[in-house]
Amino acid sequence: MTERKTLSEFDRLPKRVHAIIVTCRSGQKLCKDIRQRETGEAELNFFFEPSGKRCGPKSAQDAIKSGLLEPNNDGLLGPESSQTWGARK
């Protein structure tokens, strides 16, 4: 009989989210930026600090929702409004 491996929560994530978590575990911080367009719409952007490399907003939001990133509590209204996230220790 072959033994089945059970996948961890981390291994079940989509590759794009997995890559964000790995990048944060290497010491980068995930940062959120809101840019106002000329049309008045707000555009949500995510990037890593200090590298400045950008990542997709959907992937970043999924990584935050995974619970494997923790807010740095730098928002005006507590962790819910945080602007940066790091890997959970």
Image (tube, rainbow, N blue to C red):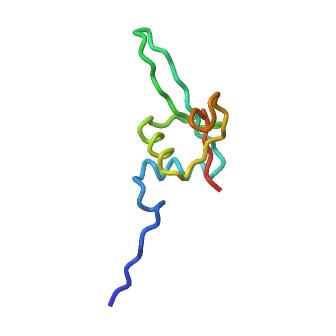
The residue under the point 45% across, 13% down is: 37
The residue under the point 38% across, 84% down is: 3
Question: Is 37 situated above or below 3?
Answer: above
Q: Is residue 25 left or right of residue 65?
A: right
- Residue 47 in the image, given as x and y percentages of width and height: 55, 34
Q: Is residue 62 left or right of residue 69?
A: left
The residue under the point 54% across, 53% down is: 68
Question: Is 56 situated above or below 65?
Answer: above
Residue extending farthest left: 1
State which quarter of the image contains the C terminus: bottom right
Residue extending farthest bottom: 1
- Residue 13 in the image, given as x and y percentages of width and height: 42, 55
**Total numbered badges shown on the rendered structure:** 0
Question: Is 89 situated above or below 43?
Answer: below
Residue extending farthest top: 38
The residue under the point 51% across, 47% down is: 20
**Closer to us: 19 or 74:** 74
- Residue 7 in the image, given as x and y percentages of width and height: 42, 68
Quadrant position of residue 29 = top right
State which quarter of the image contains the N terminus: bottom left
- Residue 58 in the image, given as x and y percentages of width and height: 41, 38
